[in-house]
Image (cartoon, helix red, strand yellow):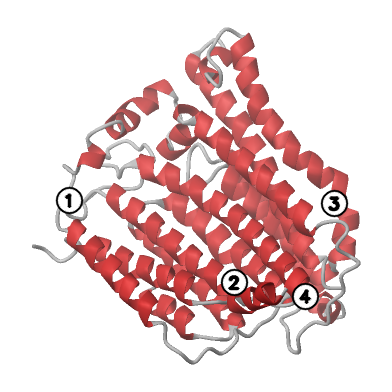
Amino acid sequence: MAAAAVGMIRLRNLFAVVMLSGIFSLSAAALYVVLDAVDVAFTEAAVGAGISTVLMLGTLALTTTEEAIKPQRNIGALVVVFLTGAVLIYSTLDMPLYGDPTAPIHLHVAPRYIWDSGAEIGVPNIVTSVLASYRGYDTLGETTVIFTAACVVMALIGRGRSKVKHQLPEGAPSFGYAALKPHSVMRVTSKLLLPLIFLYALYVQFHGDFGPGGGFQAGVIFGAAFILYTLIFGVDNTRIVIRGWFRRLMMSAGVLIYAGVGVAALLMGGNYLGYSALAHEATHGQHLGINLIEFGVGTTVAGAMITIFLMFAGQDR
Amino acid sequence: MEFPGLFNYWIVIVLMMSGFYMVIAHNNMIKKVVGLNIFQVSVFVFYISMGKIEGGTAPILEKGIEIYSNPLPHVLILTAIVVGVATTAVAMALVVRIRDAYGTIEDDEIHAQEDDA
């Protein structure tokens, strides 16, 4: 990972930098698996290595692929960086050792999640129960952030930009829709793959309470399926398959479902987002609530990812 | 001191400083965003490595398993990753707009244009 990071600093070709950052993300995901964070690894692999790389490539296609050459070394920046690094390393000397079970982080809150969530929430995956139930407010906020980000991207590079025309730089990594169209092998393979990807996304979505997975990951996988479709069949086809109003509906419906579950719990006599009130038995209510809000999260994330991607991909013509 | 010891923190700091250097020393905006992403990943690794417990396993309840890694950092970072990609998308959209307005995505060239105007 460190090698990839250094490579990214040195390289001037932005295309290579973006590719390296994809590799960097993937190795980070492998590291998370080693560190027992399977849910996080899943997300990083789908988001960091997949969607981010595609987005950056989209930007490169719209801007430029070479960094301007600046021969001078930036001594000032180097000094600042080394000083900060030295101070930080000095401060780690007081930190608990790696894997130490008595570290402060493990002594508060976490034991309760680990020992009581099974009985209180009834969902084996602790990450899911913390994410969706104990810290449901945070997750609602984060879903809203994604929704807002997609709106911002739409506002920035959506409509009204078609008047601006650029000559694409020579050798820019285009998405190659036109180039890939005649490749029948690609078309047939992707047609075979797409239903499987959707099926997998649904599995990840609804199995998130038992194994790693959940709304965030499922939404990203769902979005990735549409990105694959766009790469092979072109932006125009994707725009017909999934219309603009439908994408916007998905984005906003997800947030509304999430917030609506909260209001429903309120109306049924519980706290806002207190799912126990949703059914007669507390754990049933929790299960129902978690599934519903994960569905909301998945819908918003998928809608937002497809929208953002189409915004970038639909520009360069 | 056994091998991992504090090594995880040092790796995090090396990564974080690489990202930091990329943000402050480079003029190209895409490189700045990539640098921010490295910085971000280093913070993620920091959180996740703090959550690890020696001999623990992934926090999915299973009979016969006594030690789980701390699930709380996992939750925080999981959502942070997705929010991270959303903010990256916004940054990229801004870069595209800046390129529209100035014809370049190099910081110093934009400054020069501003000074001329």
Query: Which comes before the other along the chain, label 3 or label 1?
Result: 1
Q: Mark 4 to mark 1: distance in Å?
A: 51 Å
Q: Respond whether the residues carrying marks 3 and 4 are from the same subunit.
A: yes
Q: Which chain hosts label 2?
A: B
Q: Which chain hosts label 3?
A: A
The tag on residue A287 is none
Element under disc 4: helix
Query: Do the CB atoms of the residues marked 3 and 4 lie less than 8 Å apart?
Result: no
Is disc 4 surrounded by few (<14), some (14 to 19) or many (20+) residues within 10 Å? some
**Depth check: B50 or A160 in front?**
A160
Query: Do the CB atoms of the residues marked 3 and 2 lie less than 8 Å apart?
Result: no
The tag on residue A96 is 1
Q: Mark 3 to mark 1: distance in Å?
A: 51 Å
Element under disc 2: helix
Mark 2 highlights which residue?
A: B29
Whether residue A180 sits left or right of residue A225 in the image: it is right
Q: Mark 3 to mark 2: distance in Å?
A: 32 Å
